[in-house]
Image: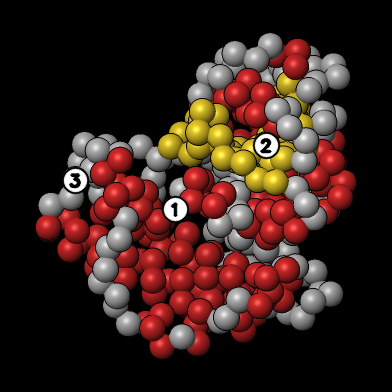
Amino acid sequence: MRAQNPEISVIVPVRNDRPGLATLLGRLADQSLDDARYEVIVVDDGSSDGSADLARRPGVSVMRTAGQGHGSYAARNLGLNVATANVLAFTDADCVPAHDWLERGLSKVTEGSNRLVAGHIEVPLSDRPSSAAIIDVARHLDQERAVRDGFCATANLFVPREVFDRVGMFNDQLISGGDGEFGNRATSAGFSLHYAPDAVVNHPPRSDRVQLARKAYRLGYGAAQQRVYAEGPLRKRPHICRRPGAYVPHFRFDARPRLQRRGANLTWRQQATAQVVEYLFVQLPIAFGNLVGTVRSRPAGDSRRQSVIS
């Protein structure tokens, strides 16, 4: 049964990730927080693998977006519309929350008023990680750094409802960067953003180069959309695709400290391979995605979404 008068609503968007969702829901059912204090809302964005059917279980509400491929921010907004708690928690279907994730996050939100809490995202590396996994860990989901820059990844985020009441929902016209755009609006409205290292979710690294390139393409495409649809400083960001340096190999690797904290001490061969992979499967796809996004993005006021690589 759905929790009555929950203190926190967990919103999970999913699209074709049945195995990840099964693991996530198992972890959410085993939280240290009493299950009467939270509800779980899964929003299916047109999955074809039965993710929505798998999610139908006691204690979980399942919603569906109208159609297919509306994007994760539209899915989160749909979840927001039916959530009943005064604190909203966000994570992704491929994340694995710690046993005390909700308890820790809720306590941090309620410590002070006007605060958003961004929890730690642990991206584990295997003993012999692929070059794609090394780059993914090096570049993405560093929540502590994101908070310092005024951003917050929705893979692990706790938000009081009053924030959405004041600044509005996620910008569902963006396929990427909507969490950063939302963070900018919230902090500009006077809300503070805090990093919570003890509210932890695990997020597997992308171990495949094609997955890495798809992520990079979305980042570049989303950056172009932000120039049209975002509010605040992101609207003024320069075109990535117009920078000559976007196409020139940089061959510098400045993420060694972060990797070393995860126990990864790269050999010179691994570092050289990572630099080449970063250029071919991150730097160039970002530039290409930004170019396509720049061409396809429509003027503000036209809310129709564009088809992009998912």
Q: Is residue 85 above or below residue 136?
A: above
**Quadrant in the rendering for residue 116:** top right
Disc nearer the start of the sequence (1/2): 1
Q: Residues within 10 Å of mark 2 (few under 14, many from 20)?
A: many
Q: Nearer the viewer, mark 1 or mark 3?
A: 3
| Circle 3 residue | 265
Q: CA distance from mark 1 to mark 2?
A: 19 Å
Q: Which mark is residue 158?
A: 2
Secondary structure type for disc 1: loop
Q: Residue at x 61, y 55 (%)?
A: 150
Instruction: Report the front residue among 233 and 25.
Output: 233
Disc nearer the start of the sequence (1/3): 1
Secondary structure type for disc 3: loop
| Circle 1 residue | 140
Contact between labelled residues 2 and 1, with CB atoms less than 8 Å apart: no
**Quadrant in the rendering for residue 88:** top right
Q: CA distance from mark 2 to mark 3?
A: 33 Å
Q: Name the spot of residue 105 as percent of width and height, x first.
A: 63, 28
Q: Name the spot of residue 142 as percent of width and height, x first.
A: 46, 48
Quadrant of the drawing holding the N terminus: top right
Q: Is residue 309 above or below residue 102?
A: below
Secondary structure type for disc 2: strand
Dot 1 amino acid type: His
